[in-house]
Amino acid sequence: MKTQPIIPTNDEKAELWLINFAYRLPAVATTFGISTAEVNQTAEDSSAFIYCLLSVKNAVVEKEERISFKDLVRKGSTDTGRIVYPSLPTPPPPPMVDALPGAFNRAAAIAQRIKAHPKYTDSVGRDLGIVAPESTFDPDTYKPTIKVVNVSKTRKITFSKSSTDGVNIYFRLAEAGRDWTFLARDTSSPYIDSTVYSTPTELEYMAKGVIKDAELPTESDPAIIITK
């Protein structure tokens, strides 16, 4: 059976993988010829990536809050009264050591050296998280998942892609008997639909997986939203 990569493609899962790898690496470093400098760099890489994701999450929350405040100023009810401008958030403190690009390339190279070592065992591999899981992906039955939210006048469509290259996204008016209309192909979630509607409109979105330009057969469950 085909195996998946040892390092997850999802950022949050990759973060957890690197935290575990950096935490457990010192205990086996001498056995597998991993230098102190490599162990320390892996720990620094883990801290740097944790900081990166935290910064991105804070920025996303900040953006959404400011868009909401802008919308309230633009078209909120006058009965609300005066509203306080949002303050700037306090950014998380960065790690003490500057970041070095290629954190997961270095970790993957160390993992390959460990797996090629005569003393390597599956038990060690499981502890370090470097035993590739078997893939259960079946293109004939794979069903993407999608979610859609309003962001100002646009719609943000997040989707899963698993082992596909991306998804084809379709939409239609949420009325009985309407056919799906192709909207876009995207290889990286999320997709932003910036189509402007003059009045609130109820829409449905749907996605199908794509591998090497071939569309997979199974539709996602529809995601319904009313435009702003």
Image (spheres, rainbow, N blue to C red):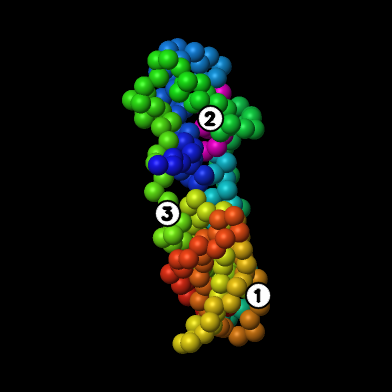
Residue 147 at least partly seen: no
Q: Nearer the viewer, residue 220 or 71?
A: 220
The residue at which mark 3 appears reads as: 138
The earlier-in-sequence mark between 2 and 3 is 2
The earlier-in-sequence mark between 1 and 3 is 3
Q: Nearer the viewer, residue 200 or 104?
A: 104
Using a 10 Å C-alpha cutoff, classify the residue at mark 2 as few (fewer than 14 neighbours), some (14 to 19) or many (20 or more): some
Number of the front mark, 1 or 3:
3
**Residue at position x 55%, y 26% in the image:** 109
Number of the front mark, 2 or 3:
3
Looking at numbered disc 3 in the image, what kind of residue is underneath it? Answer: Asp
Looking at numbered disc 1 in the image, what kind of residue is underneath it? Answer: Thr
Image quadrant in which the C terminus is located: bottom right
Residue 102, position as x, y percentages in the image: 62, 32
Residue 21, position as x, y percentages in the image: 45, 29
Residue 152, position as x, y percentages in the image: 61, 70
How many angstroms separate mark 1 from mark 3 (CA)? 33 Å
Residue 109 at least partly seen: yes
Residue 128, position as x, y percentages in the image: 41, 28
Element type where label 3 sits in the image: loop
**Residue at position x 55%, y 63% in the image:** 215
Element type where label 1 sits in the image: loop
Q: Is residue 145 above or below residue 9?
A: below
Image quadrant in which the N terminus is located: top left
The residue at which mark 2 appears reads as: 108
The residue at which mark 1 appears reads as: 195
Residue 172, located in which quarter of the rendered image? Answer: bottom right
